[in-house]
Amino acid sequence: RKDGDSWVCLLNASKKPKPGTRLVFEGAGIGDALMAEVEGAMADEAGAGRVIASSRPADAARADRIVLPGDGAFPACRAALLAVPGLHDALTEAVTIRARPFFGICIGMQMLATTGHEHRTTPGLGWIAGQVTRIAPRDPALKIPHMGWNDLIVTGSHPVMEGVCTGDHAYFVHSYQMRVDDPADRLAYVDYAGDITAIVARDNIVGTQFHPEKSQAAGLRLIANFLSWKP
């Protein structure tokens, strides 16, 4: 890259990546849309920059910002991060030591938790303390997965939340939810016969359970805010 360019790295958390390839979203069904929205926001909101899709530790180490989307089960996503030698360490150093802005999406957000309980107990990244457990609505008539549009209920303020309000619509597809230990880490939730965490944040880290690239105005605003955020 050229000096001064902004570089956003999108990492794989859905399939076992092959080092050196650009298959971050292969088979996940959201890759092209997310890539296009991030690139568009880079041009519109954050000026000139480059977005790359990569599973290479070197790219994670050099990125100015990191986006971790995910698709599938928690254990598989965790295994995918560990499958590429050096990727987990590069990601951890970039986010927790060099404080690069990080955006986890869907399973990528759940990976921030201490532990996941999907199929079996699996350690998460542990960057935001909490547990990932199966959704259990109080109304037994409600189906799992929680799928479709739901209205955000905003409970916290944050630079990435600028322009995002209670009542904004977001698109969800998931059967498990993140429950944070510290309520201050939850910025928004939705009601599905019980609270479901929708947005979390701490320090240089933010995550959404919903898919921002599918969530119209609110999702695009979050992406744009993340790209201009300077924690």
Image (spheres, helix red, strand yellow):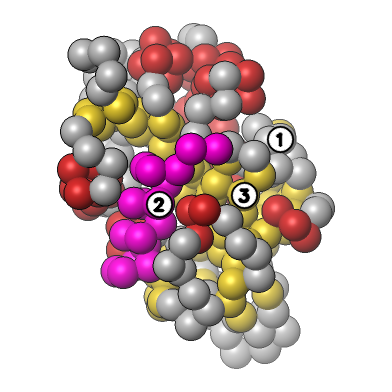
Badge nearest the viewer, 1 or 3: 3
- Left or right? Give the position of 230 relative to 179: left
Q: Nearer the viewer, residue 85 or 39?
A: 39
Q: Hey, what amino acid is under mark 2?
A: Asn
Above or below — where is 176 with respect to 47?
below
Badge nearest the viewer, 2 or 3: 2
Q: Nearer the viewer, residue 5 or 79?
A: 5
- Tell me residue 30's x, y (percent): 28, 51
Residue drawn at point x = 41 percent, y = 57 percent: 222
Residue drawn at point x = 61 percent, y = 80 percent: 191
Residue drawn at point x = 37 percent, y = 42 percent: 227
C-alpha separation, residue under disc 1 versus residue under disc 2: 24 Å
Above or below — where is 222 with respect to 152?
above
C-alpha separation, residue under disc 1 versus residue under disc 3: 13 Å
Quarter holding the C terminus is top right
Q: Residues within 10 Å of mark 3 (few under 14, many from 20)?
A: many
Magenta part mainly helix, strand or loop? helix
C-alpha separation, residue under disc 2 versus residue under disc 3: 13 Å
Label 1 secondary element: loop
What is the span of residues highlighted in magenta in the rendered image?
Answer: 215-231
Residue wearing tag 1: 126
Q: Hey, what amino acid is under mark 1?
A: Gly
Q: Nearer the viewer, residue 31 or 152?
A: 152
Q: What numbered label is drawn on residue 206?
A: none
Q: Earlier in the sequence, mark 1 or mark 3?
A: 1
- Left or right? Give the position of 195 relative to 222: right
Q: What numbered label is drawn on residue 225?
A: 2
One can see residue 71 in this view = no
Quarter holding the N terminus is top left
Residue wearing tag 3: 201
Q: Earlier in the sequence, mark 2 or mark 3?
A: 3
- Tell me residue 154's x, y (percent): 59, 72
